[in-house]
Amino acid sequence: MNKIYPDSGVELSPFTIKHYDRIMNIASLGFYRGFIRKAMRDMNIQPDDTILDLGCGTGRNARLMSGYLSEKGSITGIDLSDEMGAQFKSKFNGKQQVSFLARRIDQPFDLGRQFDIVFISFVFHGFPHEVRPVVIKNIYNHLKPGGTFMLLDFAEFHLDSIPALHRFIFKSIECKYAFDYVERDWKQIFGEAGFTDFQESHYVKKYVRLLKAIKP
């Protein structure tokens, strides 16, 4: 796969894709397994919700979300990697409520339907800032009026203000686009894009945040 953003961690190597879940556990020092379950609970998913999972990866999050759904609920996962798609599909064994589409989320697309929830986890920070408005527009366009956008990613903080060890770890494992991401006011940016009614939950010493916003 040709990389559009050489400095990004969004476009993964074949090795990383193959071992993605294990790498996430190691890179997060074991925190990922715990806080992701808390985040899923805090999403307050309703049994009949339709969910669009952008940058769905291997389906690890989708599998957790599916546990909250009834037979009327559904999940559509989107990722740019066919290999991720194969892992995603293998977690559901052809379950009719769950589907996968291979495409980029940083380019305009139209699925011809809208969802109750659009969810994106630890992908958004990996795009250059000039590309992020395209992702935001895709999110907005695919939400039903009154639907909820949920962003699970790094919280906002100033790199110079956090402990030196934490700053070293962050800069060692993250791509350069994450450095500006954590210092931006995302509630203001999403508010300017039309979202309202923000709520947030924090994890991992408040370095990680689940940010919820409503499409009016």
Image (spheres, rainbow, N blue to C red):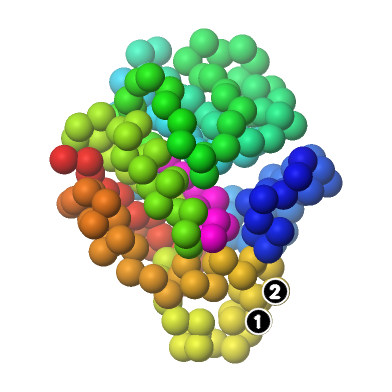
- Residue 215 versus residue 26 in the image, above or below: above
Which quadrant of the structure image shows residue 191? bottom left
Q: Which residues are magenta?
A: 119-128
Whole-percent x and y of residue 115? Answer: 33, 27
Whole-percent x and y of residue 190? Answer: 29, 55
In the rendered image, which residue does mark 2 sit on?
172
> Can residue 99 be seen from the camera position used here?
yes
Residue 161, magenta (yes or no): no
Residue visible at 65% across and 15% down in the picture: 93
Residue visible at 59% across and 31% down in the picture: 103
CA distance separating discs 1 and 2? 6 Å
Residue 125, magenta (yes or no): yes
Which quadrant of the structure image shows residue 146? top left
The C terminus, quarter of image: top left
| Labels 1 & 2 near each other (Cβ < 8 A) | yes
Specify the amino acid type for callout 1.
Phe
Question: Of helix, strand and loop, which one carries label 1?
Answer: helix
Q: Residues within 10 Å of mark 1 (few under 14, many from 20)?
A: few
The N terminus, quarter of image: top right
Judging depth in this view, the residue of 166 and 67 nearest the camera is: 166
In the displayed structure image, the side of residue 78 where residue 148 appears, left or right: left
Q: Residues within 10 Å of mark 2 (few under 14, many from 20)?
A: few
Specify the amino acid type for callout 2.
Ser
